[in-house]
Image (tube, rainbow, N blue to C red):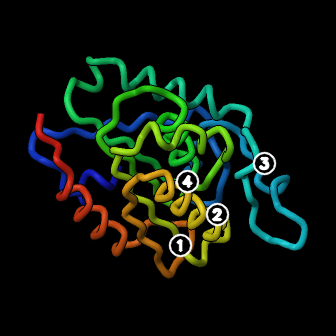
Amino acid sequence: MPFTRTIQWPAGGRFVFPQGPGTIPRSGPADGRAWWPLDLASHIPPGKSIPDLSASRPLGLQTAASLVEDVLRDRRTVPRGPLVLGGFSQGAMVASQVAFRSKVPLSALILLSGTLVDEPSWENHFRERQNLPVFLAHGRADTVLPFEVADRFRQKLETAGITVTWVPFDGGHEIPASVVVALNEFIARLQLAR
């Protein structure tokens, strides 16, 4: 929700933040939120230290995506007009599932420190979203989700004819100021007329 103070949204636009129904215990003042339990350790390939989810179809992903689709279809919550869907980490996986496995009309897709999941299934639907502008940012030093898989995701989207604004950055599993600046530039270029 701090994005509401840093993202320069067009006049009349609004933010809707569906909250993942689960919690992730962590050190600090509050627990994090999650859409489904995700055992990252079980997805670490031999000889690697970071999980690769691209061949997996996580239990709970489709349920989470369906919940988000319900929110997007609720005109009391999300009025008619341009719709930009995005997420960070697991939220980016959910946003991608909605984008590449549903027919929900989208004006743009924003993926922050996410990863490629259910690769063959998503890839079969990339061409259906050829006109969808995608903003994809990932840290080169991300120790939670691999940079290499995010870069492969970008390449596959571009091969399918999708225009991707690719923002790799020197950092980890985070959203640094340089990504916020690039995201504001991306949003400014979108044609979001009502």
Residue behind mark 1 = 139
Q: Is residue 123 above or below residue 40?
A: above
Tag in front: 4 or 2 = 2
The amino acid type of the residue labelled 3 equals: Asp
Q: In the structure shown, which secondary structural element does the residue marked by tag 4 occupy? A: loop
Could you classify mark 2 by the number of other residues whose Cα lies within 10 Å: few (under 14), some (14-19), or many (20 or more)?
some
Q: Give the CA distance from mark 4 to mark 3.
A: 14 Å
Q: Which of the marked residues, 1 or 3, is nearer the chain's N terminus?
A: 3
Q: Which mark is residue 89?
A: 4
For the image, the number of numbered tags is 4
The amino acid type of the residue labelled 2 equals: Val
Q: Which of the marked residues, 1 or 2, is nearer the chain's N terminus?
A: 1
Q: Where's residue 76, x and y in %?
A: 26, 18
Classify residue 4 as left or right of residue 132.
Answer: left
Q: Give the CA distance from mark 2 to mark 3.
A: 18 Å
The amino acid type of the residue labelled 1 equals: Gly
Q: Residue at x 39, y 45 (%)?
A: 130
Q: Which mark is residue 149?
A: 2
Q: Nearer the viewer, residue 41 or 186?
A: 186
Q: Which of the marked residues, 4 or 2, is nearer the chain's N terminus?
A: 4
The amino acid type of the residue labelled 4 equals: Ser
Q: Image quarter for residue 80?
A: top left
Tag in front: 1 or 2 = 2
Q: Residue at x 51, y 24 (%)?
A: 67
Circles 1 and 3, Cβ within 8 Å, touching? The answer is: no
Q: Is residue 86 above or below residue 75?
A: below
Q: Where's residue 109, x and y in %?
A: 38, 47
Classify residue 77 as left or right of residue 45.
Answer: left
Residue behind mark 3 = 39
Q: Nearer the viewer, residue 27 or 46?
A: 46
Circles 4 and 3, Cβ within 8 Å, touching? The answer is: no
Q: Give the CA distance from mark 1 to mark 2.
A: 11 Å
